[in-house]
Image (cartoon, helix red, strand yellow):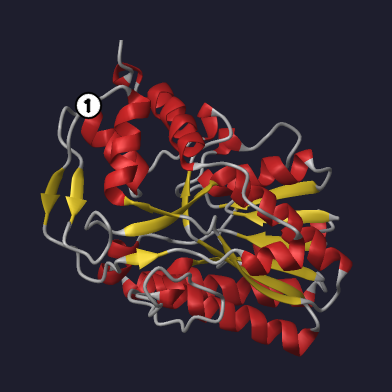
Amino acid sequence: MTWLITGGAGYIGAHVVRAMTEAGERTVVYDDLSTGIAERVPDGVPLVVGSTLDGERVARALTDHAVTGVVHLAAKKQVGESVDLPLHYYRENVEGLRVLLEAVTQAEVPSFVFSSSAAVYGTPDTEEGGLVTEETPCVPMSPYGETKLAGEWLVRATGRATGLATASLRYFNVAGAAAPELADTGVFNIVPMVFEKLTENAPPRIFGDDYPTPDGTCIRDYIHVMDLAEAHVATARALQSSPGRDLTLNIGRGEGVSVREMIDLINAVTGYDRPPTTTPRRPGDPARVVASADRIATELGWKAKHDVHDMITSAWEGWVRLHPGAARS
């Protein structure tokens, strides 16, 4: 098999490329480098620079490299930005996917893995302490979440019409790094956001501490990016062995961690001791979103191996590499 990884020079994409390459799969990276970093692509892995909106370039990449499967990670992914730029998000995430799928089906590529998100669930209505399953109703709260749900529909419909084997992977909160040089360079998720505040000698922020949770702060499910990458390997192999298969899977640990617990652990790992400050709630933040990981365990035999401490420790090593003055003496 030869897998084209769109967005393969990005934070998650680079980990997927590494995991699939180490598993013996041949990979090709397709990335417009708008946020990706070319140096993340391993030696020996071809890099094609291009947009998924460029159907001719995608088609040439599929043909030139005899691609037999696609893992589609390339997308715009900032919730707040999507509210301000919905047309941009729909163009990049939905139209880009449509163009890609058109090229994939014309080239008769048999397998397609789609990077979705827990954002498709919005504010899930689960019983107290309950888990979000793949059957939980999807009511996205942002244009970003809408584009991911629309993407799932498009992928599934294409599979049914053409026989393309498909999988939509709903990521929960991704953190950590396989190596410092692969760490997340963005400051959009809780771990790098807290790192940034600590190294600026500012208190981390908690958005609301009056939620119906044990400590009043939101509870989320965090997944190590290395585990996420291994889930892609398992999914790719499942599609390879089952033509026409259609999967929708949560990628999480099934364990909730509150924002306050996360900040306390980050302080402990980094050697800082800076109590957080509380600000008003952000609109649309649900009290608790924790994945059920039962289906992926049953379907693929996959289970996360790394805990939150591993995520923070590896992410901090990457942060210090980028910000050498951040390390505590």
Left or right, 142 with respect to 19, comes to left
- The residue closer to the viewer here, 93 or 132, is 132
| Residue in view at x 15 percent, y 33 percent | 202
Q: Percent x, y for residue 228?
A: 60, 51
Left or right, 201 with respect to 56, comes to left
Residue 162 vertical placement versus 69 (above, below): below
**Badge 1 element:** loop
Q: Percent x, y for residue 109?
A: 80, 69
Q: Percent x, y for residue 136?
A: 49, 80
Q: Amino acid at mark 1?
A: Asp
Residue 310 vertical placement versus 119 (above, below): above
Residue 42 vertical placement versus 168 (above, below): above
Q: Which residue is mark 1?
A: 273
- The residue closer to the viewer here, 272 or 45, is 272
- The residue closer to the viewer here, 207 or 45, is 207
The answer to whether residue 39 shows anywhere in this view is: yes
Tally the marks.
Answer: 1
| Residue in view at x 40 percent, y 68 percent | 129
The image quarter in which residue 285 lies: bottom left
